[in-house]
Amino acid sequence: MTTKTRYFVIASLLVLGVGLGTGLVAYYVGFPAGAAQRAGGPEELQYIPHDATVIAFANVQDVMNSQLRQKLLQALPMHEAGQQEFQNQTGINIETDIDRIVASLNPDPSNSNTPGQGLVLARGRFDEVKIEALMRDHGAEIEQYKTKRMIVVTHVREAATADARYPGQSFAVSFVEPGFVALGNASLVRSAIDLHQGGNNPQAGLSSVTGNDELMALVRSLDSGNVWAVGRFDALTSRARLPDSVTSRLPAITLFALSGHINGGLRATVRAEARDDEAANNLRDVVRGFMGLAKMQAGSNPSAQLMMQSLELGGTGKTVALSFTVPAEVFDAVGGALNNRVPKNNH
Amino acid sequence: MSTPTLGASALRIFDLSLGQMLWSRRSVFLGILLGGPVVLAALIAILTRTSLGAFRINGAAVGGATIFGMIIWLLYIRFILPILGVFYGTSLIADEVDDKTITYLFTRPIPRSAVLLGKYLAYLACTVLLVLPSVMLVYFLIVPVGGGSIAAAFPSLVMDFGMLIVGLAAYGAVFALVGARIKRPLVVGLVFAFGWEPTVLLFPGYLKRATVAYYLQALVSHEMPQDSAVSLLMQVFHEVPSVTTSLLCLAVIVGVTLWLAGRAVEGREYVLEQ
């Protein structure tokens, strides 16, 4: 072997060695895509407690201003009165006052029969005085927690109507900072205030979901949609108290991620992490079967065909991903059909 | 002085041929072939981080691991592996005949089949040392696109490496046999790799078992891309043997074709054209 050949072999093996070594370290340490990549996701995640099983995000402004919503409004104009009523009572105009929301579902340590406790963090423009007054009119009480005011409503159910699964729970609202409100289960709102004031500090028993590698890896893997949700599917199903006949037929999914971009139409990706490669292959087969069936059903409808053509099944190993696009034409067709039905119903 | 064994002779030929293969004109072609996916990956990585935003297929954003899977399927499995097998495998003996240097090897006190075996090992080393670093670079460029995790996709990379090595070994052995037995091996090789294999995979039945691709596809951890009507047909008739069956069949293909190629080289009389 000549020196030149030997150098080539060494260089090639070096590239392979460094690459495999880096990959191996990443695999065992679990560091993300880029060494310098930040936690990812919206900043509100740092106020969500670590044990969240589901987290969801919606850029409300994007959705409200989307062409899709305008089309739906034209087709279904009946919600305007309700929206006005909501604004009169809370001072919140959903169209303009809420910028974005992050929501989470956390396990309820005191009750394993419920899917969990909810927390919603919203950014926007809120009339704090009006909201507080409204809630006090409905029996809410003011509680001072650390330096924040919490408006707390405690549900005490009548014994005759009480559901054993939902014992007395407290709902709270707190304006954590100007334009930022936390609402939901009172204990979760307190945790959000703790995290807002103390930051993520696992040593002090205070850690946010940004330290939950499993969920954060899912959040980081999401594409830039204006609505998304990630979570533990197994945690949800185990708490949903589903009948055994249903549970046994559910696919062996551990994690899920949904991501969508709403504008003229809807582009979405559904990703599921199966228990193992075999479960993922089974799930892919099922999805592939449904895709074939859906493509046949699309028939000669051009907008449905457009949607079916966009179906893309992907994913590797334990991951199964399905992406699709619902084009604006589909919503136009739905809107047209609804508009045609209105005069018929009136006659 | 005793005649060296088949293994020792093959290693000597391997040592001699590796340098020849690496620094031949064919390696320029190989460099372009394997540099293509790296350049493509670099372009995607740069564009998605700057102007393009998320990489989209049919309007839907896809992550880095999915793009990497598509590159493995469309570029490496369907194109690079067969073409490397055809160009290198068919030329193992044919090149020596064309250059009229086969006599120098056959007059040595070594078994003739050791020449083929040594050259085959050199082909395998040469292609593996070029293909795997190329895949490695594509992996590190593409997988982080769209927030993909290098850690999460790492097991599939290791499986891809194994699959590529097995694929190169199988295609190389098949085309070494073609090169040793047939007069115009390149044409036959190209027809087999890009005519026979893709065609029979489209149809139901047992014909697909007479291809390397059928067994190789079972070793791929990525979902087959649905990039065309042909892919859709392949999806419909996608019949995947188990990994064990595939590995066993590919080992049999490598063993049998190399043995037959060795026998062909031992028994054939090469007439060098003047």
Image (cartoon, rainbow, N blue to C red):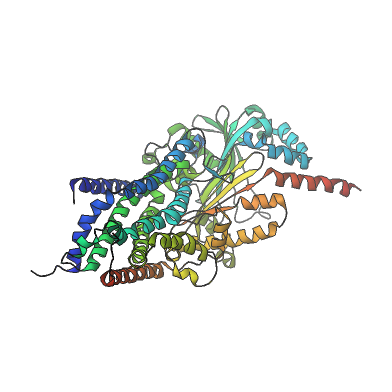
Instruction: Pinpoint residue A188: horizontal percent, then vertical percent.
Output: 52, 42
Residue B26 visible in this rendered orientation of the protein: yes
x 48%, y 44%: residue = A221
Residue for point 27% across, 72% down: B267
Q: Position of residue B125 (x, y in %)?
A: 28, 55
Of residues A146 and B54, the one nearer the viewer is B54
Location of residue A236 (image quadrant): bottom right
Q: Residue furthest front?
A: B274
* Residue at 43% in and 33% down: A198
Q: Observer-nearest residue: A3 or A61?
A: A3
Left or right of B255, for residue A120? right
Give the mark count.
0
* Percent position of residue A311, x then y: 60, 52
Asked where in the image residue B164 lies, by quadrant, the reply is bottom left
Residue nearest the observer in this picture, A310 or A226: A310
Lateral position of residue A265 relative to residue B31, left or right? right
Residue at the outermost left position: B1
Decide: is B156 above or below B64.
Answer: below
Residue at the outermost right position: A347
Q: Is residue A137 left or right of residue A99?
A: right
- Where is residue B247 shown, x and y percent of the image? 37, 67
Res. A208 in view: no
Q: Is residue B111 left or right of residue A100?
A: left
